[in-house]
Amino acid sequence: DKLSSMEDKLSHLLGDTGTNSPSDSENDSLKDSVQNLDQRLKSVCSQDCRANWTSLENLQRDLESYKSVVDTMKIDLNIQVRDVESMRGQLLNHSRIEDLNDEISDLKVRLGIVEDL
């Protein structure tokens, strides 16, 4: 609202200068109005830029936090994959041992070896 009011005053003063020669006081008033308007614009732009910058910094922190979480999940997943592979290897070894035991038992039967149980 104040910015609009200043713009109106400036437009009014500029309109007046087009028809009449401005006096020194009007000229000073015009300069003051322009300076005030300039300062207000800089202030508004500065506030918007700071707000946007703060938002960008917050977004960057959030992204870094999410990246950290994803990296941790990746490490945990890799550990779980290694554990599953290890279990798979153990199961394969166990099944091979069972297969070997079955083959030994079959051989014993064929050879007529009887074990006392």
Image (cartoon, rainbow, N blue to C red):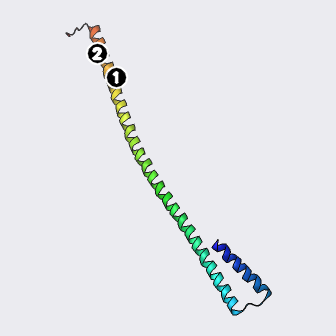
Residue 48 placement, left or right of 28:
left
Residue located farthest toward the right when viewing the structure as drawn: 19
Q: Position of residue 77 (x, y in %)?
A: 41, 41
Give whichever of discs 2 and 1 has the lower sequence position. 1
Q: Which residue is mark 1?
A: 95
**What is the distance, in whole Å, between disc 2 and disc 1 at their CAs?**
14 Å
Front residue (pair 8, 111): 8
Residue 32 placement, left or right of 72:
right
Location of residue 45 with respect to 17 vertically, above or below: above
Q: Residues within 10 Å of mark 2 (few under 14, many from 20)?
A: few
The residue under the point 38% across, 38% down is 80
Q: Which residue is mark 2?
A: 104
Q: Residues within 10 Å of mark 1 (few under 14, many from 20)?
A: few
Q: Under tag 1, what secondary structure?
A: helix
Label 1 amino acid?
Ser
Q: Position of residue 57 (x, y in %)?
A: 49, 61
Quarter of the image for the C terminus: give it. top left
